[in-house]
Amino acid sequence: MGAGEEGGVNWLVEFFGDPEHWSGPAGIPARLLQHLEFSVLAFLIAAVIAVPLGLWVGHTGRGALLVVTSANAARALPTLGLLVLVVLLIGVGTVWPVLVPLIALAVPPILVNTYEGIRGVDADLRDAAYGMGLRGRQVLFRALVPVALPLILLGLRLAAIQVVATATVAAYVGLGGLGRFIIDGLATKDYGSVFGGAVLVVLLALAVQWAFTLVHRVVVSPGVRQVR
Amino acid sequence: MNKGLRVITFEGVTKRYPDGTVAVDNLSLDVPDGSVTVFVGPSGCGKTTSLRMINRMIDATEGRIRLDGRDVKEIEPATLRRGIGYVIQQAGLFPHRRIVDNVATVPYLLGWDKKKARARAMELLERVGLDVKLAERYPFQLSGGQQQRVGVARALAADPPVLLMDEPFSAVDPIVRMSLQDELLRLQSELHKTIVFVTHDIDEAIKLGDRVAVMRVGGRLAQLSDPATLLRDPADDFVREFLGRDRGIRRLSFIPARSVRLSPPPADLVVEDGRPVGWQSGDGLQPYGSFDPETDSLRAALDAMLLSPNGLAVAVDGHGKVLGVAARDALDAALPGAADG
């Protein structure tokens, strides 16, 4: 074991250079897969809740105040506290203790950005769409969503990055994921593992960022590419 | 008044908002088939509200609007709107769609197949004076004037008999505005749509309207008449003031110069090959002003007089050949009746 005095780089070389870290149920590939599993699941559930709600509220203007206030309130929720609460309520053994706080974390940015994106579309465009004879849903999906897409994607990206970074808390309740390298490492004073785990999380967040840039390029019309 | 088939009729139409504001007050008028009717007035006069009640972007509180005899409230709004062209101030193009697809919006909604809709869109782009190379661009790549032309093309795409235009040219610079106005007049001479046009610019109203409805704040109709009558006979002080100065001069635009008596050109008019060159003055030439009696108005004739050093306007034919000259007294003689008050 023994972390070198030079710290940083040596720790990384040691961590990533150790073949044992690349195989088995506690290896990097397995942990990465678990990490992605929580993250993707939480992200998808949050998106399924928040995108339609944000579209509906942005389009109809109904419940806007409620949505924005509760989204802001949800932002103030301490993730770790929520995790412990869910464990106390339903116990360990399922993935819910980690999913619930991650969903709570991901919903607000998606909801608020989707809502703001739709609401912020130029009134003239909305007017023209109705004036051409588009019906409510057609106005939403053919005129408003394509124009609001950069903001909606921004919300999704922020949520995804937060989820990926925060999914490390799963380790607190004995679930897997990259958090295990950090939390187990802290417990055993294996700073190479702590540092390595942290770097993996950062790389994953960067990968998410990159993936969204790619999606943006594919789905957003060149006519509305202003926000990144 | 020519009672055509596609006529829009306002019957005692009032729009009152829940807070008690009256935007349009008991408006009754006809918009005849194939003509341009302009609603003009200061802001808050209810002109835009009146227009938007036709395609039910706003619903009237009282009264009825008929389109081809049918109460518009009996027609489902989206269906109604697909049958009416609509042009708004900022064009309102879909920024995420290419120009050609913007123009084809209504045909797509009506279920035309894509090829036919796009072919129609291309035809319309040409018709409104746009280079077809712009078809594959996005709206942000076009100038304001070009976007507005696209807006007009989009409104015409499904060939609706009625066109509603809500201050369509007020966001572009004066030169572009003038060319858009000329383009609209040219289009209208080919298409004969029933057009309701809203503007706050009385000059635009007079230029474009077959009939002009002047509205006053509070949503009341102050006067409805053809432009020449409006300039000659304003109904009251409000209309007179709204028309502004130069009413007399502007009226001249509506009187053809055909009736101006011409005299033979004097010797000091230098003519080459039948065309005027200038007025002889000492060793040099002085500029001249000319008009075509067949196509120009008295205003152009007067302008030509003012441009010549001796007050004589040179009359030329369609090929620019000298027909004669007109003096100030010939203009006076061509004026119908006495000067207006």
Image: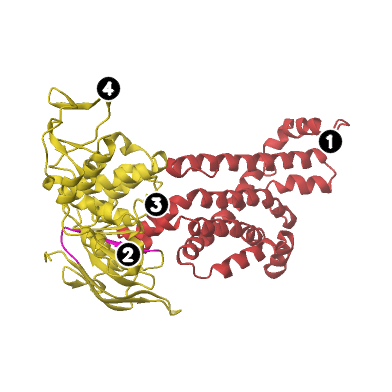
Chain colours: A red, B yellow
Chain for mark 1? A
User: Would you name the residue on which mark 2 appears?
Assistant: B240
Q: How many marks?
A: 4
| Amino acid at dot 1 | Met
Q: Residue furthest right?
A: A5
User: What secondary structure is found at the residue carrying circle 2?
Assistant: helix
State which tag comes first along the sequence, 4 or 2. 2
Mark 4 crowdedness (10 Å alpha carbons): few <14, some 14-19, many ≥20: few
Give the residue at mark 3: B90
Mark 1 sits on what residue? A1
CA–CA distance in space, label 3 to label 2? 30 Å
Q: Indicate which label's residue lies in the foreground, 3 or 1.
A: 3
Q: Position of residue B61 (x, y in %)?
A: 33, 78
In the image, A210: left or right of B288? right
State how far apart marks 4 and 3 are (Cα). Answer: 55 Å
Q: Quadrant of residue A75?
A: bottom right
Residue sticking out furthest to the front: B282
Residue A114 included in the magenta stretch of the image: no
Residue at x-position 48% and y-position 50%: A149
Q: Gap between marks 1 and 4, in whole Å?
A: 111 Å
Q: Are marks 2 and 1 in contact (CB under 8 Å)?
A: no
| Residue located beneath label 4 in the image | B282
Residue closest to the eye, B30 or B96: B30
